Image (tube, rainbow, N blue to C red):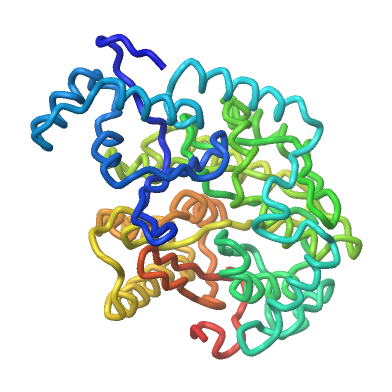
Amino acid sequence: MTTAPEEVPRLRPVEAFPLEHEGRRVIALRDPAGYAAGVLLLPPTALEVLAMLDGQHSLLDIQAELCRRWGEIVPRSDLEEVLGLLDEHGFLDSPRFAALRAETDARFLASPARPAAHAGSAYPADPDALRRTFDAFFEPPAGPGPAAPGSPGGSGAGPVRALVAPHIDFHRGGPVYAWGYRALAEGTDADLFVVFGTCHAGMPEPFALTRKDFETPLGPVPVDREFVDALAARAAHDGFACEAAHRAEHSIEFQAVFLQYLFGGRRPFAIVPILASFAHEALAAGTRPEADPRVARFLDALGETLAASRRRAVLIAGADLAHVGPRFGDPAPVSRAELAWLERVDRALLETVAAGDAAAFFDTVAAEGDRRRICGLSPIYALLRVAGPVAGAVQRYAQWPDPQGVVTFASVVLGTRAPQGAARAP
């Protein structure tokens, strides 16, 4: 790769985190948008170079700064080798990446359905293996016991209007999914599920719709295209401008797989998949979500479309909570004391969710400067805002306590009464 002195290379929005690999400390790069396949491993010294790939520093600038820090000149050829490796794997914002993205997006948009992007990696691609895996999530003591779909209120619960479920990998959070989805299966006869998902890669638009059915190993999950089109018309802006963001995003895919496991072949249902990316943008700007007129207009339009629909609908948010530790940018591993603190503040935040209070939920995160990096901020806020004043309960809370990268998550059911003791973590 050759780069003119006046050119200013820019790293794409990717995740960079420390990792132990074959006994060595390395920096791992991963693309949350899924254009760059796999993980690229680089030596720790590369981190200082990556930090200057901001579209403001030329290669000459980077050479000069590294010379100041390290006391020696880094040959231009060495920097070009690093940039060539990044560009080859799709991590640089470059003409090469633009061509890759255009080709990948065009292929997805032309496909008749949204493929099961994470089958065979995040969950089994074989239907029987998938059913056995999900069956195990319900087994006590970690799980709630088997669900009885099709018998709303069978556990003494009232009708479910909304569910906050995790979107963490199933092997880490399966039983927590099961607690929420069992309450859903037994607490509603809904035939439409409006599913909000986190867009981990971010989007220029606050919401992204798609009309594509979601493929799963257990069969396709249909999208209610009539509802999607009515919503897009009411919202009065292009809800499909960022449709390609659905291609590799797992937060809605995991909910679609769980819904198909519960209801597929038992009763007809459809989904309305909505990727969301607006609440962190509001935090960064020091405003409220509705300060962006697109957000208020879309959420109002969704409420109106639900009111006009004859379908029995439930809202679902695929959303995790805290992300802390070195993998997410913190300076030190997470201690036991910090895990206990995390649970206390997470549960306080979940009280605002269980109260159905969208404003209090957002204000709590804003007041702490999103110190915990709440991954599900946009989908949870959207769900609470559309659901209106409805109370619920935490079904299960859990942590994945890797000291290098702790993730916390929960299942919260709104519009129903939780079984006694369900709000306690195992």
**Quadrant in which the N terminus appears:** top left
- Residue 155 percent across, percent down from the top left: 73, 85
Q: Can residue 283 be seen in this view?
A: yes
**Horizontal and vertical percent for residue 399?**
45, 73
In this picture, is 64 found above or below 112? above
Lateral position of residue 363 relative to residue 113, left or right:
left
Q: Which of 271 and 87 is in front in this view?
A: 87
Q: Residue furthest right?
A: 265
Q: 10 or 291: which is nearer to us?
A: 10
State the residue at coordinates (49%, 67%): 409
- Please give left or right for residue 222 compared with residue 238 in the image: right
Residue at 26% across / 43% down in the picture?
45
Q: Residue at x 79, y 47 (%)?
A: 215
Residue 213, image quadrant: top right
Q: Residue at x 63, y 69 (%)?
A: 177
Task: Between residue 272 and residue 340, name the one nearer to us.
Answer: 340
Pinpoint residue 360: horizontal percent, then vertical percent: 36, 60
Q: Where is residue 160 in the image (x, y as percent from the top left)?
A: 67, 69
Q: In this view, does 239 lie to the left or right of 47?
A: right
In which image quadrant can residue 112 be found? Answer: top right
- The one nearer the camera, 31 or 382, is 31
As displayed, is residue 373 above or below residue 159? above
In this picture, residue 382 sits left or right of residue 367: right
